[in-house]
Image (cartoon, rainbow, N blue to C red):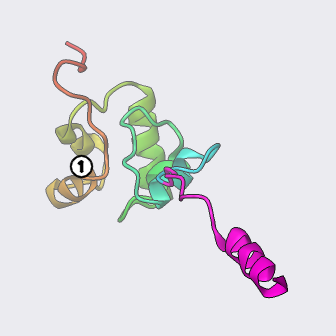
């Protein structure tokens, strides 16, 4: 009888609850730079240069220029990236994929 109780106790303790789905895309309280480093697209309104600096090919000077452009509300479409000195067509095309551009209905007139 003792081995039967032991077996029942082992079975009861070895059962686990079903896994709970967790969204790990952006940690709670994470900065925009952390989210971008984890692969999340950056908002074109992001004014934190550290977030822009996480994008490939963007150093501190370009990051500051992109943040200034965003703060002025001048980043509405991928072509607006070309306004930043040192950002050419190839760099703009590479960066455009990392930005969550607003849809045409959300853009300013």
- Residue 98 higher or lower than 37, as above or below: above
Left of 18 or right of it: where is 93?
Answer: left
Residue at screen point 16% across, 60% down: 90
Q: Which residues are magenta?
A: 1-24
Q: Nearer the viewer, residue 62 or 19?
A: 19
In the image as oriented, which residue stretches furthest toward the top? Answer: 109
Q: Nearer the viewer, residue 41 or 10?
A: 10
Provide residue 42's location: percent of width, then percent of height: 39, 45
Q: Is residue 22 magenta?
A: yes
Q: Is residue 90 magenta?
A: no
- Residue 11 higher or lower than 50, as above or below: below
* Total numbered badges shown on the rendered structure: 1
Residue at screen point 31% across, 52% down: 98
Residue position marked by numbered label 1 in the rendering: 96
Q: Nearer the viewer, residue 73 or 39?
A: 39
Helix, strand or loop at label 1? It is helix
In the image as oriented, which residue stretches furthest toward the bottom? Answer: 3
Residue at screen point 50% across, 36% down: 47
Provide residue 104's location: percent of width, then percent of height: 16, 24
Left of 85 or right of it: where is 52?
Answer: right
Provide residue 99's location: percent of width, then percent of height: 31, 45
Displayed quadrant of residue 78:
top left
In the image as oriented, which residue stretches furthest toward the right? Answer: 2
Left of 62 or right of it: where is 20?
Answer: right
Provide residue 50's location: percent of width, then percent of height: 54, 51
Displayed quadrant of residue 109:
top left
- Residue 2 higher or lower than 46, as above or below: below
Residue at screen point 81% across, 83% down: 1
Q: Residues within 10 Å of mark 1 (few under 14, many from 20)?
A: some
């Amino acid at each position: 009888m003792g081995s039967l109780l032991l077996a029942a106790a082992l079975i009861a303790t070895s059962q686990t609850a079903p896994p709970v789905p967790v969204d790990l895309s952006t940690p709670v309280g994470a900065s925009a730079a952390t989210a971008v480093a984890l692969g999340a697209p950056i908002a074109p309104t992001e004014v934190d240069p550290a977030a822009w600096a996480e994008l490939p090919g963007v150093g501190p000077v370009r990051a500051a220029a992109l943040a200034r452009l965003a703060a002025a509300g001048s980043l509405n479409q991928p072509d607006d990236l070309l306004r930043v000195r040192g950002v050419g067509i190839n760099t703009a095309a590479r960066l455009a994929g990392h930005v969550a551009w607003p849809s045409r209905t959300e853009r300013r007139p």
